[in-house]
Image: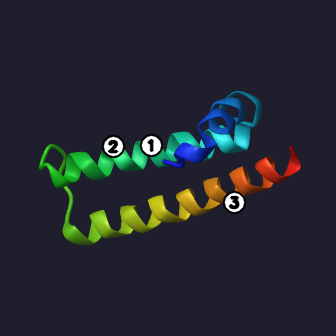
Amino acid sequence: MFPEYRDLISKLKTTDTHFARLFDKHNELDERIQRMEQGIEPGTHEQIETLKKEKLLLKDQLYDVLRKAAAAT
């Protein structure tokens, strides 16, 4: 996710608690969606779609933080 911001992501994960929380939540959702799609964890199609929308919202928020941080440097 966002390879062009790899260094900034590493920095923000240790210096910005809000960013770190968003990043961790995004990864948790990604793992949960994968488990549901693989049948490891129960989940309906609707639940998976809802989680995907939540994950996309988090990704948008992460990108916004990254853009602002990059512009500030």
Of the two numbered discs 3 and 1 in the rendering, the one whose residue sits closer to the viewer: 3
Find the distance from the CA under tag 3 to the CA under tag 2: 22 Å
Q: Give the labeled residue for mark 1.
A: 27
Q: Residues within 10 Å of mark 2 (few under 14, many from 20)?
A: few
Q: Is residue 28 left or right of residue 16?
A: left
From the top left corner, tell me how far across and down residue 22 is, in percent: 60, 47
Question: Which element carries disc 1, helix, strand or loop?
Answer: helix
Q: Residues within 10 Å of mark 3 (few under 14, many from 20)?
A: few
Q: Is residue 39 left or right of residue 16?
A: left
Q: Give the labeled residue for mark 2.
A: 31
Residue at the location (68% across, 43% down)? 19
Amino acid under disc 3: Asp
**Residue at the extreme bottom of the image, as rendered:** 46
From the top left corner, tell me how far across and down residue 73 is, in percent: 86, 43
**Residue at the extreme front of the image, as rendered:** 4
Q: Is residue 25 left or right of residue 15?
A: left
Q: Residues within 10 Å of mark 1 (few under 14, many from 20)?
A: some
How many numbered discs?
Answer: 3
Amino acid under disc 2: Glu
Residue at the location (53% across, 39% down)? 24
| Displayed quadrant of residue 13 | top right
CB-based contact (under 8 Å), mark 1 and mark 2:
yes
Residue at the location (70% across, 30% down)? 11
| Displayed quadrant of residue 43 | bottom left
Find the distance from the CA under tag 3 to the CA under tag 1: 17 Å
Residue at the location (42% across, 42% down)? 28
Say which of 29 and 14 sits in front. 14
Query: Is tag 3's residue or tag 2's residue first in the polypeptide sequence?
Result: 2
Amino acid under disc 1: Asn
Find the distance from the CA under tag 1 to the CA under tag 2: 6 Å
Q: Give the labeled residue for mark 3.
A: 64
